[in-house]
Protein backbone atom coordinates (compact mmCIF):
# COMPACT_ATOMS: atom_id res chain seq x y z
CA UNK A 1 0.00 0.00 0.00
CA UNK A 2 2.81 2.37 0.90
CA UNK A 3 4.61 1.53 -2.34
CA UNK A 4 1.44 2.16 -4.35
CA UNK A 5 0.93 5.54 -2.66
CA UNK A 6 4.51 6.49 -3.37
CA UNK A 7 4.10 5.51 -7.03
CA UNK A 8 0.99 7.72 -7.29
CA UNK A 9 2.84 10.66 -5.76
CA UNK A 10 5.60 10.30 -8.36
CA UNK A 11 3.20 10.45 -11.30
CA UNK A 12 0.74 12.95 -9.84
CA UNK A 13 -0.30 15.39 -12.53
CA UNK A 14 1.65 13.55 -15.27
CA UNK A 15 -0.10 10.19 -15.48
CA UNK A 16 -0.70 9.23 -19.16
CA UNK A 17 -4.42 9.06 -19.92
CA UNK A 18 -5.54 6.67 -22.68
CA UNK A 19 -8.67 7.83 -24.52
CA UNK A 20 -10.00 6.82 -27.93
CA UNK A 21 -10.80 8.55 -30.19
CA UNK A 22 -8.88 11.78 -29.65
CA UNK A 23 -11.17 13.75 -31.98
CA UNK A 24 -14.96 13.87 -32.33
CA UNK A 25 -16.55 15.05 -35.58
CA UNK A 26 -20.31 15.62 -35.71
CA UNK A 27 -22.10 16.07 -39.06
CA UNK A 28 -25.26 18.17 -39.08
CA UNK A 29 -26.89 16.19 -41.91
CA UNK A 30 -26.14 12.79 -40.35
CA UNK A 31 -28.12 12.27 -37.16
CA UNK A 32 -26.26 9.06 -36.36
CA UNK A 33 -23.11 11.09 -35.70
CA UNK A 34 -24.83 13.34 -33.15
CA UNK A 35 -24.16 10.61 -30.56
CA UNK A 36 -20.54 9.52 -30.13
CA UNK A 37 -18.63 7.37 -27.67
CA UNK A 38 -15.33 8.04 -25.91
CA UNK A 39 -13.55 5.03 -24.44
CA UNK A 40 -11.34 5.60 -21.40
CA UNK A 41 -8.77 2.86 -20.73
CA UNK A 42 -7.17 2.11 -17.37
CA UNK A 43 -4.09 -0.11 -17.94
CA UNK A 44 -2.82 0.49 -14.41
CA UNK A 45 -2.82 -1.73 -11.33
CA UNK A 46 -4.99 0.68 -9.34
CA UNK A 47 -8.52 2.01 -9.83
CA UNK A 48 -9.12 5.51 -11.21
CA UNK A 49 -11.99 7.93 -10.92
CA UNK A 50 -12.66 10.30 -13.82
CA UNK A 51 -14.47 13.53 -14.58
CA UNK A 52 -15.40 14.99 -17.98
CA UNK A 53 -15.19 18.77 -18.42
CA UNK A 54 -16.13 20.81 -21.51
CA UNK A 55 -15.43 24.31 -22.82
CA UNK A 56 -19.07 24.64 -23.98
CA UNK A 57 -21.19 22.35 -21.77
CA UNK A 58 -24.45 23.93 -22.98
CA UNK A 59 -23.96 22.35 -26.44
CA UNK A 60 -23.50 18.76 -25.26
CA UNK A 61 -25.01 16.09 -23.05
CA UNK A 62 -22.44 13.79 -21.43
CA UNK A 63 -23.84 10.56 -20.04
CA UNK A 64 -21.92 9.52 -16.91
CA UNK A 65 -19.71 12.62 -16.86
CA UNK A 66 -18.04 11.27 -13.71
CA UNK A 67 -17.31 7.77 -12.53
CA UNK A 68 -14.67 5.14 -11.84
CA UNK A 69 -12.63 2.67 -13.90
CA UNK A 70 -11.41 -0.58 -12.38
CA UNK A 71 -7.76 -1.63 -12.83
CA UNK A 72 -7.01 -2.93 -16.36
CA UNK A 73 -10.54 -2.15 -17.55
CA UNK A 74 -12.21 0.48 -19.71
CA UNK A 75 -15.42 2.51 -19.66
CA UNK A 76 -17.50 4.09 -22.45
CA UNK A 77 -18.60 7.71 -22.15
CA UNK A 78 -21.53 8.74 -24.39
CA UNK A 79 -21.50 12.32 -25.72
CA UNK A 80 -24.49 13.82 -27.54
CA UNK A 81 -24.49 17.08 -29.50
CA UNK A 82 -27.74 18.86 -28.67
CA UNK A 83 -27.27 22.22 -30.43
CA UNK A 84 -26.80 21.42 -34.13
CA UNK A 85 -27.07 24.86 -35.73
CA UNK A 86 -25.22 26.42 -38.66
CA UNK A 87 -23.69 29.09 -36.40
CA UNK A 88 -21.65 26.33 -34.74
CA UNK A 89 -20.17 24.91 -37.97
CA UNK A 90 -16.38 24.67 -37.79
CA UNK A 91 -16.19 25.77 -34.16
CA UNK A 92 -13.68 23.67 -32.21
CA UNK A 93 -14.81 22.68 -28.73
CA UNK A 94 -12.73 20.74 -26.22
CA UNK A 95 -13.45 18.01 -23.70
CA UNK A 96 -11.00 17.38 -20.88
CA UNK A 97 -10.89 14.00 -19.11
CA UNK A 98 -9.31 14.26 -15.67
CA UNK A 99 -8.37 11.13 -13.74
CA UNK A 100 -7.40 10.74 -10.11
CA UNK A 101 -6.91 8.04 -7.53
CA UNK A 102 -10.15 7.22 -5.73
CA UNK A 103 -8.97 8.40 -2.32
CA UNK A 104 -7.61 11.75 -3.57
CA UNK A 105 -9.06 14.87 -5.19
CA UNK A 106 -6.03 16.17 -7.04
CA UNK A 107 -5.83 15.07 -10.69
CA UNK A 108 -3.18 12.50 -11.58
CA UNK A 109 -3.46 13.20 -15.30
CA UNK A 110 -5.62 14.70 -18.01
CA UNK A 111 -6.36 14.31 -21.72
CA UNK A 112 -8.07 16.73 -24.09
CA UNK A 113 -10.35 15.66 -26.94
CA UNK A 114 -11.43 18.15 -29.62
CA UNK A 115 -14.96 18.19 -31.02
CA UNK A 116 -16.11 19.85 -34.25
CA UNK A 117 -19.50 20.24 -35.92
CA UNK A 118 -19.44 20.16 -39.74
CA UNK A 119 -22.37 20.65 -42.13
CA UNK A 120 -21.94 17.48 -44.16
CA UNK A 121 -19.69 14.44 -44.40
CA UNK A 122 -19.88 14.60 -48.21
CA UNK A 123 -18.74 18.22 -48.28
CA UNK A 124 -15.85 17.37 -45.95
CA UNK A 125 -14.72 14.52 -48.22
CA UNK A 126 -15.00 16.79 -51.27
CA UNK A 127 -12.86 19.49 -49.63
CA UNK A 128 -10.20 16.96 -48.63
CA UNK A 129 -10.15 15.50 -52.16
CA UNK A 130 -9.79 18.98 -53.72
CA UNK A 131 -6.98 19.76 -51.29
CA UNK A 132 -5.15 16.56 -52.23
CA UNK A 133 -5.52 17.39 -55.94
CA UNK A 134 -4.27 20.97 -55.56
CA UNK A 135 -1.18 20.07 -53.51
CA UNK A 136 0.63 17.96 -56.18
CA UNK A 137 -0.37 20.47 -58.89
CA UNK A 138 1.21 23.36 -57.01
CA UNK A 139 4.39 21.30 -56.50
CA UNK A 140 4.70 20.48 -60.23
CA UNK A 141 4.16 24.11 -61.27
CA UNK A 142 6.93 25.16 -58.90
CA UNK A 143 9.49 22.68 -60.30
CA UNK A 144 8.64 23.34 -63.97
CA UNK A 145 10.36 26.73 -63.74
CA UNK A 146 13.78 25.08 -63.45
CA UNK A 147 13.44 21.64 -65.03
CA UNK A 148 10.95 19.21 -66.53
CA UNK A 149 9.81 16.89 -63.74
CA UNK A 150 9.16 13.21 -64.30
CA UNK A 151 5.65 11.84 -64.18
CA UNK A 152 4.78 11.29 -60.58
CA UNK A 153 1.87 9.39 -59.15
CA UNK A 154 0.24 10.32 -55.91
CA UNK A 155 0.26 7.35 -53.60
CA UNK A 156 -2.83 6.58 -51.61
CA UNK A 157 -3.71 4.20 -48.85
CA UNK A 158 -1.87 3.26 -45.66
CA UNK A 159 1.91 3.03 -45.57
CA UNK A 160 3.76 -0.26 -45.11
CA UNK A 161 4.79 0.83 -41.61
CA UNK A 162 1.16 1.42 -40.64
CA UNK A 163 0.12 -1.99 -41.95
CA UNK A 164 3.06 -3.64 -40.17
CA UNK A 165 2.15 -2.01 -36.84
CA UNK A 166 -1.49 -3.09 -37.28
CA UNK A 167 -0.41 -6.71 -37.91
CA UNK A 168 1.85 -6.64 -34.84
CA UNK A 169 -1.01 -5.33 -32.64
CA UNK A 170 -3.41 -7.97 -33.99
CA UNK A 171 -0.82 -10.69 -33.35
CA UNK A 172 -0.32 -9.39 -29.81
CA UNK A 173 -4.07 -9.55 -29.13
CA UNK A 174 -4.20 -13.14 -30.42
CA UNK A 175 -1.40 -14.32 -28.12
CA UNK A 176 -2.45 -16.05 -24.87
CA UNK A 177 -2.76 -14.09 -21.64
CA UNK A 178 -0.51 -14.65 -18.64
CA UNK A 179 -1.93 -17.45 -16.51
CA UNK A 180 -3.36 -19.41 -19.44
CA UNK A 181 -1.89 -22.82 -18.59
CA UNK A 182 -3.66 -24.71 -21.38
CA UNK A 183 -1.95 -22.82 -24.19
CA UNK A 184 0.70 -24.52 -26.33
CA UNK A 185 2.42 -21.20 -27.00
CA UNK A 186 5.77 -20.75 -25.12
CA UNK A 187 5.45 -18.89 -21.81
CA UNK A 188 7.63 -15.97 -22.94
CA UNK A 189 5.02 -15.12 -25.59
CA UNK A 190 2.22 -14.82 -23.03
CA UNK A 191 1.17 -11.18 -22.58
CA UNK A 192 -0.35 -9.41 -19.60
CA UNK A 193 -3.79 -7.76 -19.74
CA UNK A 194 -2.00 -4.40 -19.45
CA UNK A 195 0.05 -5.09 -22.60
CA UNK A 196 -3.05 -6.22 -24.51
CA UNK A 197 -4.95 -3.06 -23.55
CA UNK A 198 -2.11 -0.92 -24.91
CA UNK A 199 -2.03 -3.02 -28.11
CA UNK A 200 -5.81 -2.58 -28.52
CA UNK A 201 -5.50 1.19 -28.00
CA UNK A 202 -2.71 1.48 -30.62
CA UNK A 203 -4.68 -0.71 -33.06
CA UNK A 204 -7.67 1.62 -32.66
CA UNK A 205 -5.53 4.65 -33.52
CA UNK A 206 -4.05 2.86 -36.56
CA UNK A 207 -7.52 1.80 -37.76
CA UNK A 208 -8.76 5.39 -37.51
CA UNK A 209 -5.71 6.60 -39.44
CA UNK A 210 -6.25 3.98 -42.20
CA UNK A 211 -9.91 4.98 -42.67
CA UNK A 212 -8.89 8.62 -43.12
CA UNK A 213 -6.31 7.91 -45.86
Image: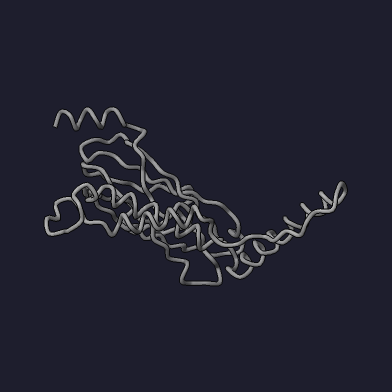
Q: Position of residue 1 (x, y in %)?
A: 13, 32
- In this view, the residue in front, 44 or 155, is 155
Given residues 110 and 164, the one toward you in this image is 164
State the residue at coordinates (26%, 56%). 175
Question: Residue 69 at x, y = what percent?
Answer: 25, 50
Number of numbered discs present?
A: 0
User: Is residue 105 shown above or below 198?
Assistant: above
Residue 184, x across and y down, in percent: 17, 58
From this view, report whether residue 55 is shown above or below residue 77: above
Q: Is residue 68 left or right of residue 115?
A: left
Q: Tell me if residue 112 comes above or below residue 123 in the rendering.
A: above
Above or below, 3 against 169 in this view is above
Q: Is residue 86 left or right of residue 203?
A: right
Q: Which residue is more in the foreground, 155 or 135?
A: 155
- In this view, which residue lies farthest toward the right? 145
Q: Residue furthest left?
A: 181
- How is this picture coloured? one colour
The residue sitting at 39% across, 60% down in the picture is: 37
The residue under the point 63% across, 60% down is 155
Q: Position of residue 70 (x, y in %)?
A: 21, 49
Instruction: Assign the C terminus to one quadrant of the image.
Output: bottom right
In the rendered structure, the answer to whether residue 182 lies left or right of residue 50 reads left
Amino acid sequence: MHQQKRQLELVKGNLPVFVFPTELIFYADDQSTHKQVLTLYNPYEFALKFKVLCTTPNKYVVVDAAGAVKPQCCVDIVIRHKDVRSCHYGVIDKFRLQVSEQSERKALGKKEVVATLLPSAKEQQKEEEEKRIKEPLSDSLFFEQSFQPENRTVSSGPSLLTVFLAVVCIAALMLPTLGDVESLVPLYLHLSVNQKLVAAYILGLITMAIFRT
